[in-house]
Amino acid sequence: MSKINAFAGVDVGSLGTKAVILVNGEIAGSSLIRTGINSVENGLESLEKALDSANLKKEDLKYIVGTGYGRISAPYANKTITEITCHAKGAHYLHPATRTIIDMGGQDCKAIRVDEEGNVVDFAMNDKCAAGTGRFLEVMANVFKVDISELGPLALKATQVLPVSSTCTVFAESETVSLLARGEKPEDIIIGVHHAIANRIKGLFSRVGIQSDVFFSGGVAKNTGMRKALEEVLEVRIANPKNDPQLVGAIGAAVSAQKLYEKGGNVNQRSA
Amino acid sequence: MAVQELELTNKKKSTKFSTVKFDENIKEKIEAAPDLVFRDGSRVSGSEMWRFMTTEGPKRYPNLFSKGKNHGFSDDAELISGFRRNYFNTTMYDRLNRFAAKGTPVVFIQGGQTHEPYYAAGGIPIRPGQVNGWATNSKENMDYDEADLRRLQIREIGRQALTVDACQTAKYEIIQNELVQGISIIAPYLCTRCSDIGYGVEAHRHGKVQLPLLPVDFPVNNQQNKPWAREYVAENLRRLVRKIAELSKVEVNDDVLWKEIKLHNEKRRLAREYLDLWWSAPVPPTNSQDHTAIAGLGNESSNDPVAAKQILEESLKEVKERIRNNVKGKNLSDDPVRLFICGSCVNPNPHVVDRAGGVVVGKDDGLSEIFYDVEETGDPYEQLAKTMLSFPYELPTEERGRWVAEQVKKSRADGMIFMYQWGCNFQSAAARLVADVVKKEAGVPTIIIERAMAESAQGQEQLHNRVEVFIEMLRQGKK
Amino acid sequence: MSLETLVKISEAVGRRPEELARARNQGQKVVGWLGYNIPEELIHALGLIPVRLGTGGDGKLVEVGSRYISSKNCVYTRNLVGLFAENTDPYIQNSDLIALDSTCLQLYRVGEIIHYYFNINTLTLGVPRNFFLPEAKKYFQAELEEFAGKLEGFAGKKLDAKSLSESIKLFNGIREKIKNIYKFQSEDSPVITWSEVYNVVHAGYYLDREQYSAYLSELLQELEEKHRNRNIDIEEEEARVLLAGSSIPPGDNKIIKIIEDLGGRIVGDDLWTGILPYLGIDIQESSIKGLADAYLKRVPHGALPYLDLNTDKRLQNLRESIKSNNARGIIYYTLRYCDPYTFKAGETKDVVKQDDVTLLEIHTEYAGSDFEAIRTRVGAFLEMLRSGI
C-alpha cells in the first residue's frame, strides 16, 4: 500500500457529485460534476477528477467513504455514511466552532446540531416537499427566466417583500405566477420566495434549536440572497467558510475516512 | 418569537391599491341615522361613524380601507346598514382592547356554535378568524401588502411551532407569543367543524403562556335525542360558565342565561326572516359580500350582541324596502347564477363571484348555526346542549347532505360549491359525500374546491379561476 | 423463524379466512371492528366473533380510497376506504357488521363513507373527548349500554353475566401474556425479535380468541425455555430504538424495514397497533359499567386531547417504556394528516429529552417516493445513537 496518507470522500448528491482528497489532514484535491443517471459512474468520475487535481492515483487512497443519495450504490467506497453525519464532520473540520449547520442541497435541506467534537446531537430534515431546496430555487429561476445564480442578487434589489407561501413548491409556484400576472416586480416576488424558504428552515430549527456558530453548507449556500434572508429570519450571523460550501459533505466523508482508518475500521463494512 | 420586522433599504408604501372613499351623497343619511347602542349602554352617533370611517379608520388601518379588484368593503354604498356594519366590525379591535384592559375575560372559542354561555358568564367569545384579525391589526398603519405579509408570517409561526399539516394553529401561536393581549381562557367546542382545534388546545399545555384550558365536548353522530349525551354536554357547559364567571366575577344564575338565550334567539329569528325574504326575492337585493355578512350577524356578534342585533334589524328593514322596489344588489349581473356554499372557514371571494355573474345565496355552516332556536323552557343548559347537538352542520354527513339539498332547493341555488381549507381533515372527508347527496337530491351540479391554506390574499388566482369556471358552466346550463 | 409456535400461529392465520366463512355458514356472526375503544369482551360474550380490521401500506388502495375520502386525510383512513371499495380483504368480506368508535374522528368519517358508498352495516360507539371529566364517565357508560343493546339485537341474544365474566377473564389473560411476550424481545440476545412479537399481536386480530390465548401460552413456554438456554452475545453500541406515533397496521412495513435493514434494533413500541391496547385495563366489575370505566381509564389514544402535561398517562407510559426497554432513541412515526400524533411530536421530543433520549420524527405517507430520504434520516439517527464515527 502507498506510503501517502491519503483519504477520499465522495458525495453523490441529487444535482451535483463531489469528491475531496485529504492528504495528511489537508485538502489536496477536489472535484464537482453534475450528477447524471448512473451514480456509480458519477462517483467514480468525480473521484478520478479529484485524484487528478491532487496528482494522486486511486491506489494511493487508504480509505474511501461514500455519502449522499448515491451512497447506496458506491462499490468504490469502503464504507458509506449518511450525508448528515458527513456535513457535521465537514463543517467541524472547516470551522471547529460550528454548533449548528444549515445544509441546503438539491432536494433536501437539513438542520443539524453538533457538539464540540463535531458529533451530531440532533437534526431535522425537510419532509417530502421540495420547498426550501435547491430544486425549489431552480423552479423559481425558471418562472422568472433567469439563471439560478442571478436569484440572490435580484432579491437584494427588492423594494418590498411580497407574501409568498412556504408550504409547498407547487403552491408557491402558482402564487408566483399569480403575482407576476398582476404585474408585481420580479425582485419583490423573489425576495418573498427567499423569505418563504427561510421560514421553512426556521421551522426545522424549531425542533432542534439553534446555537452559534452557524455554518451554511450545500449548493444553495452560494446564493447571497438566501444567506441574507436566513440571517434575517433566523436572527443569527452565519459564519463565512473559505471553501466551496458545496464540498462540505465530501470533506466530511474524507475526514470520516481518515478517522475510520485510524480506528482500524474494517474495510468493506457497509452501513447507512 | 416575534413577527419578523423586515428592514428593506429601498422600502416604500405600496401605491397599487386605492383607499376607499365613501360617497359624500350618503353622508347625510349616515349622519341622520340613529345611534348605535351597545350592550353597556354606550352609544355612537351617525356623525361619529362618518368621522371614523372617513378619517381615523383609513389612517389607522390603511389595509382595511384599501380597495382592490378582489378586496375591500362592498361597493354598495346605498346600503346604509352596510356602512354601519363596516364601522361595527372595524372598531371590533378597539373594543377587544378595551375589554382586555378592563379585565373582562376574552375567551378563545370555535366557530359555528352558540355563544350564549360565554356572554352570560361575562366573557367575550372570540373565534379563531377574529383572533387572527386582532393580531394582524394590532399593528397599525400597514398597507394591504404589509398586512397580508404579516398574516402569512403569523400563520408561519404556528406551523413552525406545531406542524406544517396544521390549519388553525396560527392562533395557537398568537396566544403563545402574546401577539394580542388579553385572551384569558381557551374554551372552544370540540365539534367536527375543525380537525385541529382539539390538538391546538392541547398544545398550549406545553407552552410558555399558561392559560386555563376548558374545551366543551361535542358528541358526534346525531346524539341530540340521547338524554345522556345532552346531560354530558350540559354538564360541560355548566363547568364552562362557572369557570368564566370565576374570571369575570359575574354572578350567573339561570335567569341571566335565559336572558342571553332570548337575545340570541331573537337574532337567529331575524336572520332566518332575512334569509327567507332574500331567497324569495325575484331580484337579489344585496351582493354576495353584504348578503353573507348580514346573514352572519344571526350568530356572530363581533363581541356585542346588542349592537349586532340592531344592525341586523336595520339591514332587514333596508332589504325589505329594496325587495319592495325591486332593487338589485350593487355589482350583481341580471339573473345571476345562484351559488350555495358548503364547508368551513373559507368562502369563494365575493368580488370574484359577483364579477363572474354569480351570487352567493347561502352557506351551510352560517345557516346551521341559526337554524334552530334554543327552546325557552326547562333547564337552560340542557336546552343549549340539545340545540347545539341538533345543528345540521354537525349531523352525520349523509344527513347534513340531505339538509343542504333542501336548502339548495329552498334558496333556488343553481349549483353548490364545497370549499375546504388545505389540511382540514374533517371537512375534506365530508366533501364528496355532501356533494354527492346534494347532486342526487337537489339535482344541481356541485364542485369541490380545496383552498391552499398558506396562500397569501393575493396569490389566489387559481382558486378564483375555479370558481369562475364553475359559474360559467352553470350559466350555460341556465340559458 | 426458529420458534415453532410462530410457525403454528402463522399457519393458523392462513387458515382463518376459510374458518370464518365456515363459521358463518353455520350461523355464526362476525363483527369486524375499527377504532380504539371497542371492548372486544362484549362482542365475544355475545357469542359473536370479533375481528380487528384494517391494513396499511398499499398505495393502490390509498388511491382508490382518496376518491371517496380526501387526500387531506391520513393514508391509513384512505387505505381503509380503499379496502372496502375493492372488497378483496377476506376479513372484510366475512364481517357481518362493522363496529367503530369515535375516538379518531377521521375514522368516524370512514364509517360514514363506507356506509353510504358500499352499503356497509355499521354501528358507532361514542367516545367522550373530555374523557377525564366525571360527567364523561356517565356518558360513556350510557353509550356503551346502548351499544351493547344494539349488539344484543344483532346477536339475537341477551348478554348474560356468566359469559361476560368468562370473556373478561379470557381477554385479561391475553393482555397479560402479550405483555410478557413483549418483555422477551427487549432482552440482550433476544430469542424473539420485536417484529416477530408485532406479528403475533396482529395474528390476535384475526384468530379465534380461545385458540389465540392457547398459542400465546405455548409461545411463552417456548420463549422461557429458549431464553434460559440462549447464548448471550452482547453487541456493542447497539442502536436500541422505541417505535412510537401513529398506528402502523399490518402491511405498513416501510419504517420497520428501513430501521432493521440499517441495523437498528427496535426494542419496543408505543403504538395502538402494538402494545398500547393491552396496557392499563383493570376491569373492576364484570358488567358494562365495569368495562366502560376500565376502557376510559386506560392510556388514552392520542386523538383524545389531554390538557395537563404532568399527569398525562400517555407520556408517563412512554417514559416508563423507554426505561424498561432500555431504549436510546425514539423513532416517532407520523402519518401526514394524522393530527393527533403529529401535533404532539415536538412536545414529546421535549419531554423525553429529560430522560436523555432523542426523538426522530418521520412524517410520511405509504408511497415509496420518500424511501431514500427516510433511509438517510434513520441512518443518521442510528449513527448518532451509536455515538457516531
Image (cartoon, coloured by chain):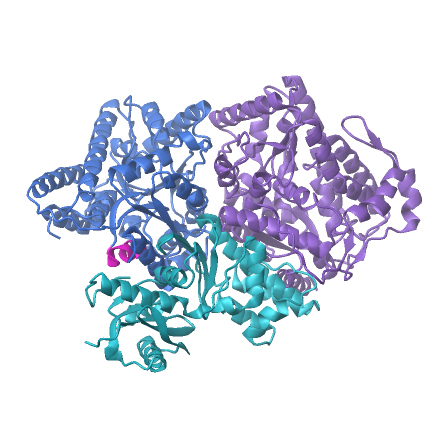
Chain colours: A cyan, B purple, C blue
Question: Which residue shows up at 63% across the image and 20% down it?
Answer: B377
The magenta region covers: C254-263
Can see residue C333? Answer: no
Residue situated in front as seen by the camera: A70 or C170? A70
Picture quadrant where residue C159 is located: top left
x and y percent of residue C62 in the render? 39, 57
Picture quadrant where residue B12 is located: bottom right
x and y percent of residue C190 in the render? 15, 46
Q: Is C261 included in the stretch rendered in magenta?
A: yes
Question: Which residue shows up at 60% across the image and 25% down it?
Answer: B244
A57 is higher (above) or lower (below) than B355: below
C325 is higher (above) or lower (below) than A34: above
x and y percent of residue C306 in the render? 44, 33
x and y percent of residue C166 in the render? 21, 27
Can see residue B136? Answer: yes
Q: Residue at the far left: name it.
A: C229
A156 is higher (above) or lower (below) than C386: below
